[in-house]
Structures are given as structure tokens and as C-alpha cells.
Image: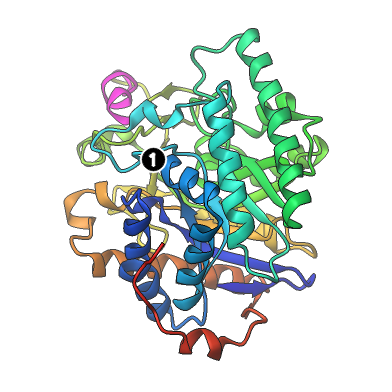
Amino acid sequence: MRLFHPDGQTVHLSYCTNVHPAEDLDGIVAQLDTYGTAIRRELDADVLGLGLWLAAPAASALAAEPHLRRTLRRELDSRGLEVVTLNGFPYQSFQAEVVKHAVYHPDWTTPERLRYTLDLAVVLADLLPDDAVRGSISTLPLAWREPWDTERAGTAGRVLDELADGLAAIAGRTGRTVQVGFEPEPGCVVETTEQAARLWAGMDGDWLGVCLDLAHLACAWEEPAEALSRLARAGLPVMKVQVSAALTADDPVAAQAVLRGYDEPRFLHQTRGSRGEAADDLGEALDRLLPRPRRTPQPWRVHYHVPLHAEPAAPLGSTLPELRVALKELFGGPTAGCDHVDVETYTWNVLPPAQRPVTPAQLAAGIAAELAFARDELIALGLTPGGPTAPLEMMELQEVRPWTP
């Protein structure tokens, strides 16, 4: 979906497809029908934006074969779907039974991460709508914090220089700008915007910047206005905003039984307390951080993306108030702080059973409700709904054919 900011910018709103498991091209295209088309119709939208996730093998195949990229673009167009952003954080197997720390590998000290991201840039350059100003790719904030030393930091710096050069070369060949945003995340080398500003000041802002995930920002207990000001002073552009809400517990002692229902084996759920206590997973937090008797409990924020439109059951909550403050700082002023907005709730399939969708139709309806929520929040800040400049009737009349590479 597209909205227009009062400053004249087109703001692209999408949902991230890393919630779906397919990693080969046939499966990815099948998901366009199962979810993309269904969500677009649920929203009565002429065009639906996807924040597409491509596993490394699929990205490599598409980057190597122009005809495959043309075919995928045709499949998207024929369904009224468009892509201006890719999620390049998970390398592969993101919906495996157990992911945990594996999502941080390979990291930005390796040639594999560089090759994957440049493959994504080649693909995105051909998927971008003709009237899109640019494309964006989100990626991990260098690596998990351990092990990390000056040697690894130096290696990563050289790899990022190669990345910027590679993106410039792709732009020179295709005429399309694709930029990469590094996503601060709890537990990683870069967890906060303060760390980002310190480590990445002087980064080549023409090609490289920050992906601001609003759940991560809240888990770091950062104030959005201060965080954005800090990034701006460091010369770090916000390449992409991920609209997400984290799980909260004002009194984790009273809520511990309910919190146990969110302690699951697939993803890490880093937990941060208001007084600085930290754990790398929710189970660890419940076992180690709960206060001793007579000590006042501190509120927790848990890196567990919860549906935007549906608050968790009491006594839990979400960082929705912080999300609204961040959106206001980004979009409520005279200039839009970013033009790519991606709803990223990848945890639908591991929610407690009472909240978990059990059919594709239920998942599609839930994602559509999240997108409607995000759209309405942006409209309340003064943005207006819009659409692509291409004739929509032509897209609606195209025949949807099976995937034929």
C-alpha cells in the first residue's frame, strides 16, 4: 500500500514475508496466492506491498538468471503486489523448528553475508516498481556480540566498504538505487542507537544506514525522539522502519505464569528490564532475573513481536504506546523520516495456542488486520492513501498463470 506524506513523499507500507516458511521459488510464488492476494483483497487494496524475504539459495538463483527475475516480477505484477524492500537479516531456515542464535550467521565478517546481500540487491533492482525512488534491504547489526574483538571489527569494516562499492556498481549498471539498513537488535554488537552512532558515524550514507525496528527500540528503553536525533547527528539515514511491538510485563513476578506461555524453542526472546537487567532469552529471564522477596519488581520488555492490533491478555501488554510515539516522531512532522515502512510480526506461528492462527486464512486475516492498523495510524498522522501511477485496471485484467521459470 502507498500513502502520501504532506511533504510530497510516497510512503510504502508492506508486510514482511519472513513469517512464511517457503525458501524455493515455487514455494515463494505459491505464497503470493495463499497470503499476498488474500491479504490484498481483505484490505480492498489496489496494490499490496510485500517486504519480501528470500533465503540465500533463492536469492542466488534469481541473481544469476535475469529471466527468473523477470518471471518473479511478472508474478507479482499480475497479483497486484509490489516490492520496494527485502528482509536480508535471516540467511535461511528462518522458520525452522529451532532458530535461536543461528539467525546471526553468517555475519558481516564473512564473504557469504556480503554475497547474499549483493544478490538481494541485484534481485531488488529488477523487482522495483518503475516509479519507485529506491529499494531497501534490512540486515543484521554486524553480528551477535560474542565473540567480537578489534580484528573482527576491522574485517567487518572492510566488508562494509565492499558492500557500498557493490551497491554503487549495481546502481551504475541498472540505474536503480538499492540501500542497506543495519538493524540494531538486543544482544548484538549494535543493540542501541547510541552504539550505532558511535560505531557507524562516517558510514557511506549514500548506500548504508539504519533499519529502525520499533520493537527493538522499545526493548532498549530508548526515547524515539532522542534516538532519531542521535542518528541524524551521526549522519546515519533511516533506510527502513519496521513497525513491530514487543511484549511487556509491568510486574513480571505476577505475570510469570503467563510469560511461561511465550517461552518457546524457535526464536530468541531477549528480555530487558527498566533498571538495566538483561537476559538473552525469556526462559533465562524467568529463571534468573525474577526479584528476591521484598524487592520491587522492575518492568520487562521482551523481544517477542506481538500482533499490532491485538494486545496480549492481561497482565501482559505491548510496547504499542512507544510505537505510536515513534511513528509520530517519524511521520507527524513536516518531513517524513523514512519512506519504507514494513510490518514485521514473524512470530505468528509460535504465539501461545489460544492466539495462534491454525489455517492460512486465519494468518492472512491477522496480517491484514495488522496492516490496516498501521495504515490507520499513519493516516491519523496526516498521511493520505494513494496508489501507483500505473493503470491499476491493467494489473487487474492480467491473467494469473502458474510459476514458469
Mark 1: which amino acid?
Asp
Residue 293 lies left or right of residue 375; in this view the side is left
> Is 304 in front, or is 258?
304
Look at the image and tell me whether residue 22 can be seen: yes
Question: The C terminus appears in which quarter of the rendering?
Answer: bottom left
Q: Position of residue 275 (x, y in %)?
A: 50, 26
| Helix, strand or loop for disc 1 | loop
Q: Is residue 25 above or below residue 107?
A: below
Q: At 81% from the left edge and 38% from the top edge, which residue is drawn?
A: 235
Q: Is residue 245 above or below residue 192?
A: below
Q: Position of residue 34 (x, y in %)?
A: 30, 68
> Which residue is disc 1 drawn over?
250
Residue 325 lies left or right of residue 93; in this view the side is right
> Is 107 in front, or is 307?
107
Q: Is residue 285 magenta?
A: yes
Q: At 41% from the left edge and 84% from the top edge, which residue is drawn?
A: 399
Q: Position of residue 323 (x, y in %)?
A: 54, 53
Residue 175 lies left or right of residue 102; in this view the side is right
Q: Which residues are magenta?
A: 281-292
Q: Position of residue 293 (x, y in %)?
A: 28, 19
Q: Is residue 47 magenta?
A: no
Q: Quadrant of residue 388?
A: bottom right
Look at the image and tell me whether residue 213 can be seen: no
Question: The N terminus appears in which quarter of the rendering?
Answer: bottom right
Around disc 1, counting alpha carbons within 10 Å, would you say few (fewer than 14), some (14 to 19), or many (20 or more)?
Answer: some
Q: Quadrant of residue 250?
A: top left
